[in-house]
Amino acid sequence: MLEILGSLFALAIGAGFVGSLSGLGGGVFIVPALVVFAKMPMQVAVGASLISVVATSAGASVAFVRDGWTNLKVAMVLECATVTGAVTGAYLAGVVPTVVLEVLFALMMLQSAYSTINKMGDSILTQGDPLAERLQLGGEIRDDVTGQMTHYGVRNLPGGAVLMVIAGLMSGLLGIGSGALKVIAMDQVMHIPLKVSSATSNFMIGVTAGAGALVFLARGDVSTAIAAPVALGVTAGALAGSRVLPHANVNALRMVFFAILLLIAAEMGWRALSGI
Amino acid sequence: MARAVRDLKMTQQSHEDLILRAWTPFLLRTILIVAAIILVAGLILMANYSPGFYVSRFQAVRSGHFHARDPMGVTFSKALWGDPHSVMTVGLLVLTLVPLARVAFCFVLFIMERDYIYVAFTAYVLTGLIAGVLLGRIG
């Protein structure tokens, strides 16, 4: 028993650590690791992945919110779009062919990986657009070089919200966390600094994943024997990741994000080809 | 006048922000600790009393048999009697309530602060999530 628990813990700690640093949750690692290495059925892996996303989100957000990295108001506004997409997606599941979506999603991840690697550093905009200012969405971030607090503005809320609806749709249709799309929407469309985007995505992914996990638990689709050690390990990993993010170099973070986007593209492509 | 209104908004925003930044981590941490304690207790009970059961359960899950579950009421009463599997299920349930509790907390806070735009946003999210969960159509 201890051998099994030890390997699940180790896997989950790694997933929680990278998941909280990148803002993507741990699901992207948990699903392939459980299916490929632990030979678990896909349904068990998805249930454990939902639990791990909730644990990553909650564990990392304790420090991110306290230290001001999470933009709470941006999260609350964009959660409206995500929830709309998630509920709509859940209703459309079975109507839309998932293979097409998986291929589209994989291509979108490849394109995002390309944009991520092309956009190095962070160009902070001090003034937001009128809608964002009206909703008081701007915030403050500590400058890596000077150590001074700098105000950042938020732009293009409607554009970001559209991507969030798509992120929610993908969650509902494909059962994935869509943290990657959330980070892309905030970082590349709304011009929010990458560390804030990552911390805010971390905060947001827990909401739909938590609701999804409740449904899975009520249906009996979560295997407690797998999900319990995974949840504990992921929480520990996420707490550690949240200590590292404030000191992380933005370009190094972009490289991690780039590698994960390629991994997601490969995973989605594999799912589409193997018909899972 | 315009400046006074803007200052008032700024004061309201920073007051709200202070409460959110102080209480949200406290709420998240408290529920997380409770969930972790319950999960660890379940694993310790399992390791002490039925390690063989865990291994057989693991093998059963691997071969796709994991649907043997009790209704939630039965799970809670079995957890009170120290059944390791039910204790862990309750721990997972507590964990999944963290994000919903956080949205509910923000909703109440915005009502108290009379920040009606954000009351509407959080009410929308809460309604969508609860409807999704009740209809079993989310996740």
Image (spheres, rainbow, N blue to C red):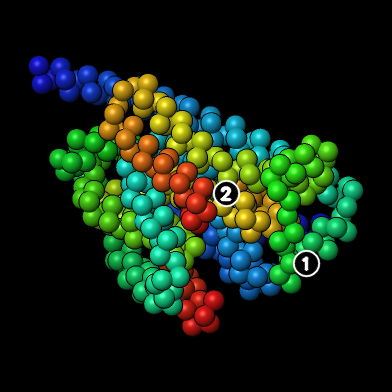
Label 1, residues with CA under 10 Å away: few <14, some 14-19, many ≥20: few
Q: Residue at x 56, y 41 (%)?
A: B97
x then y, percent, for residue B93: 63, 44
Q: Residue at x 44, y 60 (%)?
A: A90
Q: Are marks 1 and 2 in contact (CB under 8 Å)?
A: no
Residue assigned mark 2: A214
In the displayed structure, would residue A25 be above or below residue A173? above
Q: What amino acid type is highlighted by mark number 1?
A: Ala
Left or right: B137 in relation to B12: right
> Within the image, what quadrant is residue A101 found in?
bottom left
Marks 1/2: CA–CA distance: 23 Å
Q: What amino acid type is highlighted by mark number 2?
A: Leu
Q: Nearer the viewer, residue A68 or A168?
A: A168
Left or right: A39 in relation to B135: right
Left or right: B81 in relation to B116: right
Res. B85 visible in picture: yes
Chain letter for the residue marked with disc 1 in the picture: B
Residue assigned mark 1: B60
Judging from the image, what secondary structure is the residue with disc 2 in? helix
x then y, percent, for residue B28: 54, 35
